Image (tube, helix red, strand yellow):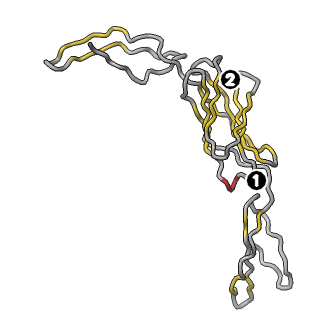
Amino acid sequence: PEVINGRTYKATVVDLSPWVEYEFRVVASNSVGIGEPSRPSALLKTKAAVPVVAPTNISGGGGSRSELVITWEPVSEELQNGEGFGYIIMFRPLGSTTWTKAVVASVESSKYIYRNESITPLSPFEVKVGVYNNEGEGTLSSISIVYSGEDEPQMAPAGASALSVSAAAVEVSWLPIPWNRHTGRVLGYEVRGW
């Protein structure tokens, strides 16, 4: 803070964060040095303001068929700037011009799931997440690409064969299921025997 003239008995403190409690002390100084600080003032909360920090780490994906899962890192309390804080989620299919908007009123939220039977598996969406409070809507994040949920595999593995390797073991092999634009990658196989 800047040094204030010895004949001045008040000062304006600037660059404080909105909706945060502060207490203040005053310290006198002269050519000999700095004295003891005053006792702290009473707590004073600054006025609320529109939030200016957007959520970070926008991502998502996964989920079930016909779902778009969107995740983000929540905004910390000291950056919420007022009461009534929540999140604004905006998304649209890649290449579309119309945004869908949803509101999540929970401060602690970090996930939103949009369900719609018309969503095809592994469809890319443009996603933005913003913030709001009782003072108004704040900043939106930059656009991230998030994919809708995958579908289950539509075909069985081909070329299954078995080879006896010992009295207690059989080696089973098969041809992998190729990657499919709609069903996605195969995460694993289940081998059944009878």
Image coordinates for residue 21, horizontal then vertical, percent: 73, 64
Q: From this view, report whether residue 114 is shown above or below residue 39.
A: above
Kind of residue indicated by mark 1: Gly
- Is residue 17 positioned above or below 56 on the image? below
Q: Residue furthest left?
A: 167
Q: Nearer the viewer, residue 1 or 171?
A: 171
Mark-to-mark CA distance, 1 and 2: 33 Å
Residue at x-position 47% and y-position 21%: 185
- Report the residue marked by disc 1: 82
State the residue in front, 125 or 120.
Answer: 120
Q: Quadrant of the N terminus?
A: bottom right
Question: Which residue is at 66% across, 48% downward?
Answer: 75
Position of 28 with respect to 194 (left or right) is right
Q: Which element type, helix, strand or loop, lies under badge 2?
A: strand
Of pointers 1 and 2, the one earlier in the residue sequence = 1
* Disc 1 crowd, CA 10 A, few/some/many (<14, 14-19, 20+): many
Q: Is residue 6 left or right of residue 24?
A: right
